[in-house]
Image (cartoon, grey):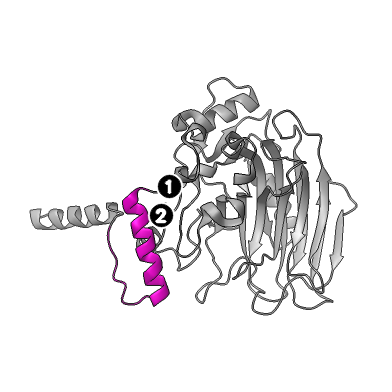
Amino acid sequence: MTMKKLLAILIVGVLFCNFSFAIDLSEYSAEEQKQYKEIKKLKEKGITGKNYLKEEFWIKDKKNFYHNIAAFHTGIEDLRIKNKTMPILGINVGRNWSWRKGEDLKEQIAFSVIGKGSIDNGEMGMIKSKDHAWHGKEFYQITASYENCNPQYWDFKECMHHGGSVHNESVDLQNVSKKRNGTLTKDGDEAWIHIATKPVRNILFPNNRSRTFHIMQCHPKGSTITFMITYQGGKLYLDAQLTKPDKKKWLLKEFDINEHNGSDEWTSITMHFVNSTKSDKGKFTVWIDGNEEPIVDYKGQTTIKKRDRCRIHSGLYANAMLTAVDKHEAQDSTVWADAVAIAKSKKKLFNLIKKKDK
């Protein structure tokens, strides 16, 4: 390789590693150009989610903070989480902050204060422990810390959204856009879905219904969500926001709440979902903990025209963090998740789960 070629490669590498670059705004709308300038100012000022909290509530030892949560709740001394994006079996997933214009790294960084969101410290990661997993030998820990909120991503100001929000999710790489169709791709599409979930710490608040913790959602274009599986007020719900003539919200489970505002038990959720604008085609059927009788058996419209495609997210999306009486409880909201999977049939779904630990 010539010295000239080597120098060119090094220059390109430096350019791609420098995340503070400017971009050509000529192809963007006036509103998008305004958003870019706002984000650039926030970056120059060094604004982060910490600016929305008093310093006394900041995480002091971030390199060990999330690992210590895992060690405490498993009882395994010196446990270290393997930093890893949680898989959703059956689809290819990526991280947060890739919602708008494809997966172009330069574009995402330019229009986001925090880029794609770091999990380098164990904010999301894998724990190996057969004694604590729902199934097999490993599972995932996901923690929502309010100080990790994104001050702005395009026009979305996460830190102030719904009383203070933070996302820590795995998302289907097939976003809903002109070029891609999402996870459920058309009117009448169906899916079999599973998630095993455990609310470990600062998730169950029976006296504060404002705080919500979404562990799965199917997100169409727009702000109304096709469905969300949510911890709220110390209970677990399925919230379907596009059912007609009325929105539906079903109670899935109540918990014995421990001293950590969590529960000591896993919950297995299996759902058969047909996403349809037609009242005789749509369906939500949900089974809890392997019971033969479904806890939800809904037949009817589940979506509307122009929202009939949706994209699966799973992990933890927390709202109303600023309503926490003790703001320390907005820094370590933690769930465990296992065997998160999606398939076109029940047989394929359970085959994915069986193969998970082989």
29 to 107, vertically: above or below: below
Q: Are marks 2 and 1 in contact (CB under 8 Å)?
A: yes
Q: Name the residue rendered at 46%, 35% in the picture.
A: 55
Q: Quadrant of residue 239?
A: bottom right
Residue 135 seen in this snapshot = no
Label 2, secondary structure: give it: loop
Q: Which one is closest to the eye, mark 2 or mark 1?
A: 1
Q: Which residues are magenta?
A: 21-46
- Left or right? Give the position of 66 relative to 193: left
221 in relation to 53, above or below: below
Residue 126 percent coordinates (x, y) = 56, 38
Quadrant where the image shows the C terminus: top right
Going by the numbered disc 1, the residue's amino acid type is: Thr
Residue 48, which numbered label?
1
Quadrant, the N terminus: bottom left
Place residue 261 in its image quadrant.
Answer: top right
Distance CA(mark 2)–CA(mark 1): 8 Å
> Residue 2, image x and y in percent?
9, 55
Task: Using residue 356 as the reference point, say whether residue 145 is left or right of it.
Answer: left
Residue 27 is covered by the magenta coloring? yes
Q: Which residue is mark 2?
A: 113
The answer to whether 152 is drawn above or below residue 231 in the figure is: below
- Nearest the viewer among 125 and 221 is 221
Which residue appears farthest toward the top when viewing the image? 77
Query: Can you give x and y, in whole percent of width and height, for residue 220 in the image?
Result: 62, 68
Disc 2 marks a residue whose amino acid type is: Val
